[in-house]
Amino acid sequence: MTHLLHIDASARPGRSGSEPYGSHTRRLSHRFVTRWMAARPHDRCSYRDVGVAPPTPVSAAWVHAAFTPQAQREDWMQQVLAESDALVDELLQADLLVLGVPMYNFGPPAPFKAYIDNIVRVGRTFGFDRSRPGLPYWPMLKGQGKRIVLLSSRGDFGYEAGGHMAGMNHVEGSIASAFKYLGVDEFHSAAIEYDEFADERLAQSIAAAEQRVDVLVDMLQVATPG
């Protein structure tokens, strides 16, 4: 049985194509998960909406608590880290992450950055030891077979690799870098562009992204046991 973790990060609550002013990323992530579960109904899917319920941003107290060894933590430290612990536990249980993350001002929305900050945890998702030969850091999720599908959207166009705006796309790269640091190396993506133009180019981009989603579902299911 495969465990999906479906996360949406758009500030828009609805899905485009279904509701006025709905989210393109929610549309794509919903399509992926719906098609996946239709083909594999015995798999499990957990859902988290950080766009509607953002994680608490990291604070000085959070950093103090996170870098205090577990056995030495005071009660207040456990309380400060409780939300982060729940997010990490959820991540550790997942095999496939389906992330609906739009581009806001060239990067991911602030709530998703807060999510990343909460799951990059010393002693839980990455290791750290100053006395270790070579680099003192190592990924703790490596070898667990976790995979990521990032489904994004952009108001403008040309943010794909080789595009004229590629150098300003800090969504796919930043998210892939954070998870690779933790040991998650398999990364797939699809994106809708031309949202601000609202013309035939947007319609074509939506159709192409949905086709890419369908291809990803089929491809990843073939590579998934059971």
Image: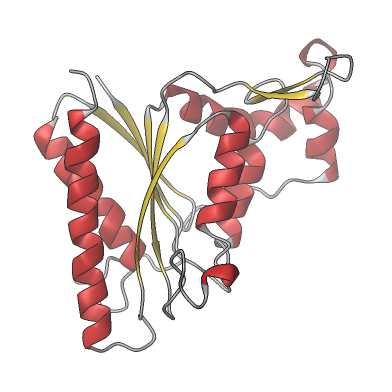
Along the line of sight, the residue nearer the viewer: 221 or 1: 221
Image quarter for residue 191? bottom left
| Residue farthest along the left direction in this orientation | 39
Horizontally, residue 4 falls left or right of residue 108, namely left
Would residue 106 be visible to someone looking at this image? no
Which residue does the image show at 84% across and 22% down from the upper left?
68
Which residue is outermost to the top?
71
In the rendered image, the quadrant that contains the C terminus is top left
Q: Is residue 42 above or below residue 10?
A: above
Tell me what residue is drawn at x 66 percent, y 44 percent: 117
Residue 44 image point, x, y percent? 26, 28
* Residue 82: % across, % down: 64, 30
Image quadrant assignment for residue 137 = top right
Q: Position of residue 193 (x, y in %)?
A: 36, 74
Q: Does 155 appear above or below 66?
A: below
Depth order, front residue of 61/221: 221
Q: Residue at point 22% right, 66% down?
A: 208
> Is 54 in front, or is 151?
151
Q: Quadrant of the N terminus?
A: top left
Viewer can see residue 207: yes
Q: Is residue 42 or residue 164 the one in the foreground?
A: 164
**Left or right of residue 104: residue 149:** left
